[in-house]
Image (tube, rainbow, N blue to C red):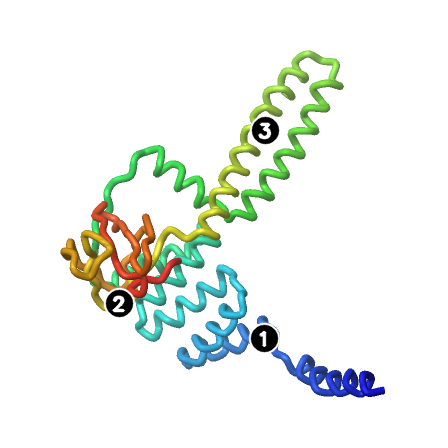
Amino acid sequence: MNVVKKICFLVVIFLPMSLWAVSPEQQVAEANRAYFTGHYENAVAVYEKVTQAGFASPILFYNMGNAYFKLGNMPMAILYYEKAHKLAPADADISHNIRLANTRIVDKIEPVPMLFYIRWWDNARNMLSPDSFAKTSLVLFSIFWVLLACYFLARRRGLRVAAFYLALLLLFSAAFGMVLASDTHHRALNPDEAIVMEASSGVKSSPDDKSVDLFVIHEGTKVKVLDRIGNWKEVRIANGNSGWIQTKAIREI
């Protein structure tokens, strides 16, 4: 009987809590209302609760970036715009807001021109999200098997040749899509880029407070993370310069 009473007690206590629990969708809707009524700090507070609970989506990060932008917090705005861009690389609004926010920061770094094949790969990777690449590849694989069946079953030589070469094309396209999906998924799970959060940070020649300052970067600047040692990270900026910065000065995308 004591066990039954304990179970009943727990049900009485926790059932109302579960009924009154607010879903992430409701929290996001609440934050959106706060944003559109000009209460940007309230909107940010609710958005942060949702992300801390483990939820992530391009529109969520985009809205967070907009709220921080309205508050004048460019480092956080850029951080969440970049997070949204990772999940939806083809979204024109996100790309536009990243460019707009970068006009509001101190550092205006001229990027080193990329080699053509690296630029081509980045452009291909940014065409779709990892899920979209995977779904497209599965569709292409399905069509490939249909064409392969046509090749074996068709009687006309011209139809068999067309089915064969088209099947090969789709097979290579599907495989290429899966490679892109894997690469973009890996980048999402293993961030190698970060945003500078401190007003100004000295980038040093080695992971040591006593080492020489090579250059200074300011809040909102995007860096590529190359290595990690203790509380230090080796970073490279868009013009190719690199050095060591304390981990606390940056937040990974």
Furthest residue toward front: 2
Foreground residue among 48 and 29: 48
Pointers 3 and 2 in contact (C-beta within 8 Å): no
Pointers 1 and 2 in contact (C-beta within 8 Å): no
Mark 3 packing: few (<14 Cα in 10 Å), some, or many (20+)? some
Local secondary structure at mark 3: helix
Coordinates of residue 234 in the picture (x, y in percent): 28, 52
Q: Which residue is drawn at 54% across and 65% down?
A: 55
In the visual, does 104 lie left or right of 7? left
User: Which residue was labeled with disc 3?
Assistant: 171
Q: Quadrant of the N terminus?
A: bottom right
User: Which residue was labeled with disc 2?
Assistant: 198
Q: Which amino acid does label 1 sit on?
A: Gln
In the visual, does 135 lie left or right of 231? right
Mark 1 packing: few (<14 Cα in 10 Å), some, or many (20+)? few
Mark closest to the chain's N terminus, 1 or 2: 1
Mark closest to the chain's N terminus, 3 or 2: 3
Local secondary structure at mark 2: loop
Q: How far apart are marks 3 and 2 (CA)?
A: 48 Å
Q: What residue type is labelled 3?
A: Leu
Coordinates of residue 10 in the picture (x, y in percent): 73, 84
Local secondary structure at mark 1: helix
Mark identifier at residue 36: none
For residue 72, above or below residue 151 = below
Mark identifier at residue 26: 1
For residue 192, above or below residue 71 = above
Coordinates of residue 118 in the picture (x, y in percent): 35, 37
Mark 2 packing: few (<14 Cα in 10 Å), some, or many (20+)? some
Q: How far apart are marks 1 and 2 (CA)?
A: 33 Å
